Structure formats: structure tokens, C-alpha cells
Image (cartoon, rainbow, N blue to C red):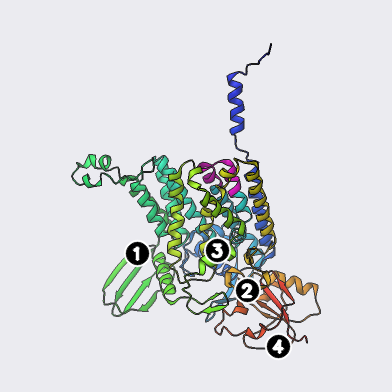
Amino acid sequence: MNATTAIPSNRINDLAGRSARPKWWIPALLLTLFALQSLWFIQTQSLTYDEPGHIIAGLQAWQQGRFEMWTDHPPLGRFWLMLPIARAKVAITSEPLARGYHVSAMQPGPEWLAWHTRPMNTLLGIALGITLWFASRRLFSEGAANVALALFAFTPSLIAHFSVTTTDGIGALFVFLTACQVVLWRRNPSRGQTVLMGLVLGGLLLAKLYTPPEMLLALILMLVLRRDGSLSLAKLRDWNSAPPRAKSARSGVHWKPALAALGIALLTWWAGYLFHVSHLKVGDGQVVATFPNRATKTWATKSKAQLNLLLPGGEYIEGFREVALSNRRGRAAWFLGKIYPKGGIKAYYPVAIALKWPAILLALFFASLLLGVRKTCRAPGDLLITCLFGLVFLAFVLQSRFAIGERHILPLYPFALLIAGGIWEHARKHRLGMAVVILALCLNAADALRYAPDYLAYFNVFVKPENSWRLLTDSNLDWGQGLLALRNYEQQHPGETLHLAYFGSVDPTLYGVRAVPLPPGQTVDGKVVAGASCLSGQVLDDSNGYRWLWPYQPRQVLDHAMWMFDTGAK
């Protein structure tokens, strides 16, 4: 006779609850690994070209309420990054150049400034990782969320651009936050979620100037989406004939919450500019613009219009004008061994993805798509809504004439990671599949660590590191971050004299570098260290300035970004 033991129902519920309880230690560990790699980067990489400018602009905003330097970047990122030094006494001396600017003095020094600003960006990276994990868990499963986060934690571009004092990271964070918040609002269109939607949209506008299309998409989706994901447009044809009180109910269009979210977003956006009001006067062949705490700005115009306007947040409109003019002029790009003086290369970003994105991430992304990511998604409509933001961003960025760095498509990463993580839903059905995915994650980590801590210079396994500069330069590879590696080399070789061709805004002597500056076009016999962006000529007035170095074989590569030649060797 077999005896059976009955398990009390409360005990069954307790066991089920334990099995469903998230294993928080896994995402915590992965985020810790991401943060440690970020701190390693901060310790070993000198300030990049753009960072001193962002620091100057951020301190002007905090201490003087002035938005003047590089207004093509909204202030939210700078406010956040400069928070630890908002009231500190910082003196940075910079001089404008024909191309860019040069920083000749910093007090405190560049390493102090790096440690007091860059970690704030790392916190934004952690916030993006947390958002990605919860979004993946909601759409797929905890296992898929862990896969997505494991890829995130070892994605070199994310580590690098969430470890520098720039605004690319906050742009990626808010684009993805907006996509996730639209999904959450659709599930629960309460007043609280509407307020949160408005705050996120306000942050989106204050993060980067490429975000208005994303905001417009969010508002349209708020208007037309039902909770079940279907469109609410079927009865719009009857809306005009309906009584006022019945219009909302009969059409199903969410006018009130969308307008409320828009109002909160615009108020948040204006608050980000400290409620500034600018005065714009157009007439007599010129435009006169006045901004709070700044000198009047005047430029010629062919327009015959006569305008006299007060503009809330006029610096934002000024930034849009600068972006439009820059995009029209274009910018020099180095692409697969050739200089394009005005950029505008349609294949630039697809090729940058193929060269700079980890091969494992790309493989898992395409495998997940081919196997049918929607079939394994708990809410395919939510997945489509989320990824729509990535598709809209991609459509706009492909029209840009700026081709100076893969960082400009940083917002695409979380959407790709989300889909790649969905591969777990197929793999977990078979032990072999699970083993393959886990092995792929280990290989991805090993691939990223090949370049550690020089994550900014990362190219995937299909590119030999010594040839990377022949494909892409500028912030893809050499953004001026190699001075600490050069200083370490000089300390290890005190008797050597080096000549330096350097792309960066910070004077190398501020890091204690002794190398002799080597102007473009000047040849020397001896040891020469040349940054990749100088070798390609992308950042030079004369792109041929250092091509005399091309026939020489490099003796060493510092920081994966600075090539050392011995031009006196026979």
C-alpha cells in the first residue's frame, strides 16, 4: 500500500511564490560589472574632445543661469553631470580655433574634473540597464531580461559613452524611457501615469535635440491606442457630429490625457531653461536675438518678414537653428579609407553598426528576429510599440549628414538588446539551446574585454585592431582619450623623445605629457605618436597633413587609439 502525503494549499502557494520571486542578485551582479568597467574607463582615459566644453557650459548654467556654449545640446544632461561641482570653483581657460577649441589651463586638473563628473553619467547608464531589465522581463521573462542585461553589461560603446561627460548617454536613456512609459500608460492611463508621461516627455526634450519626433510619436500613440493595443480611430468619422460630452467616449481618442501630458512636458522643458524668455526681432535685413544673461546676438537675413516676438526657452530654438545650419553644411567624415568633406554618407551608420557593434549582439538580434520574437512575447503589441521608437529614430538618423561617430546612434542599442534578449524564450526549451546562449554571453564578455579599458576604441572581431583607423576615426576610435596611456609610456621610457600628433581639445601638458607637438605637414626623424583621427586627416584642415606616416609600420599602439612610429629606423 502506497502512502501519499498531502501538501497543504498554503505550502503550495508559498513554494510557487518562491519560484516566481525574481533572483535579484543576477541583475545586481551584472550592473555592478557594468559600473566597475565604467570606473576602470574613467581611471585610464583622458578627457575626450567634447568634455571640457560640456563642463564649461554646465557650470555656466549652474552658476550664471546662462546657456550660450554649444546650445545644440539641451541642458538636462549638463545639469545632472555637473551636479557634484555645481558650486565648486573651477577655472577652465579655452581659446576658439578655426576648427574647434583648445583648453590651455584647468583648475582643478583634468583628472579631478573627470572623477567629479563622469560617474554621474555612469549612474544614468545603470538607470538604462534597470529600465532594460524591467522592460525585457515584462515583455518576455526574467531569463530574457538577464540575457539582455548580460549583453548590456559588456557592450563597449555603452560602457564608454556612459563614462564620459557628454550628453549621448542621456539621450539614449530618455528615448528608451519614453518608449517604455508609453506602454505603461496604455496599460494604465491613470492621472499618475499621465503626469509621469509628461515628465518623461519633458526630460526627453531636454536630453537631446533629435527627440521631438520621438515626442510626437508618443503623443500620437497616446491619442489612438486602446489598452488592447488596437487603434481608436474607427469612430473618428462620427466625432464631429457627436455632442461635446459624448465626443471622447464615441471616438475613443484620448485628447485630455495627451494634452495634459503635452502641457506638463512643455512646462518641464521650460523649467529646464530656468523659465528664460528671449526676444527675437526680425527686420531691415537682420535678426536681433536677446537671451537672458548673455550678450545680444545679431546676424544678417534675406527674409523680408517683420517680426517682434517673445520666445520661451529661446536657446532651444537657437540650438535647432545651429543644428539645421550644421547639417546643411555637412561635416568631414572618414569612411573606409576615404575623406568625405561634407559627410552625407548613407551607408555610414549601417557600416558603423557592422564594424562597431559586438558580433554576438548582432547574431543574437538577427537570430531572435528570424525565430520569431513576437511569437514568444507576452504582449506582441507592447513590443511593437516599444520598437517603433527605435525605428523612427533610425529613419531620421539615416537622413543626417553628420557622420562623425557611432555614438550618434546610441539610442538604438537598448531596442536591439531587448530583441536579442528574447532569444532566451526559444533557447530555454532545450538544454543545448540554453548552453549555446550562455556560451554566447561569455564570448561576448571576452570580446569586450579584449579592448578593456579602452572601450571607446572598440571594433568587433571582424576588424584587426591595427587596421581600425583605416575604416572609421573621430569618436569611433580616437576622440582625444589617449593622453593617460601616453603619459604612462613616457614614465616607463624616460629617455625617449616623442613627437605627438594629437586630436583633442586638452593641452597634453595638463596631463604631464612631455611629447613635442608635431604640426601637420612637418616631417621628423624619430619616434612619432599619432592619433587615429590625425592619421586619417578627418579633423584637419589639410587631410594630407600626416599621410607621410602611412608607409611606416607602427611599432606599438597606445590605448588602441594612438599609433607609434619610428621614422628614423632603417
- Res 557 quadrant in image: bottom right
On residue 353, the disc is 3
Mark 4: which amino acid?
Val
Between disc 4 and disc 1, the foreground one is 4
Whether the magenta-drawn stretch holds residue 204 is answered as no
Between disc 2 and disc 1, the foreground one is 2
Q: Is residue 263 visible?
A: no
Mark 2: which amino acid?
Trp
Q: Position of residue 27 (x, y in %)?
A: 62, 45
Name the outermost residue toward the left. 241
Q: Give the alpha-carbon distance from disc 4 to disc 1, as whole Å.
A: 55 Å
Between disc 1 and disc 3, the foreground one is 3
- Res 293 quadrant in image: bottom left
Mark 3: which amino acid?
Ile
Task: List the residue tagged with mark 4.
Answer: 524
Q: Which tag, 3 or 2, sits closer to the chain's start?
A: 3
Q: Give the alpha-carbon distance from disc 1 to disc 3, as whole Å.
A: 39 Å
Q: Is residue 12 above or below residue 511?
A: above
Q: What kind of secondary structure does the magenta stretch mostly adopt?
A: helix
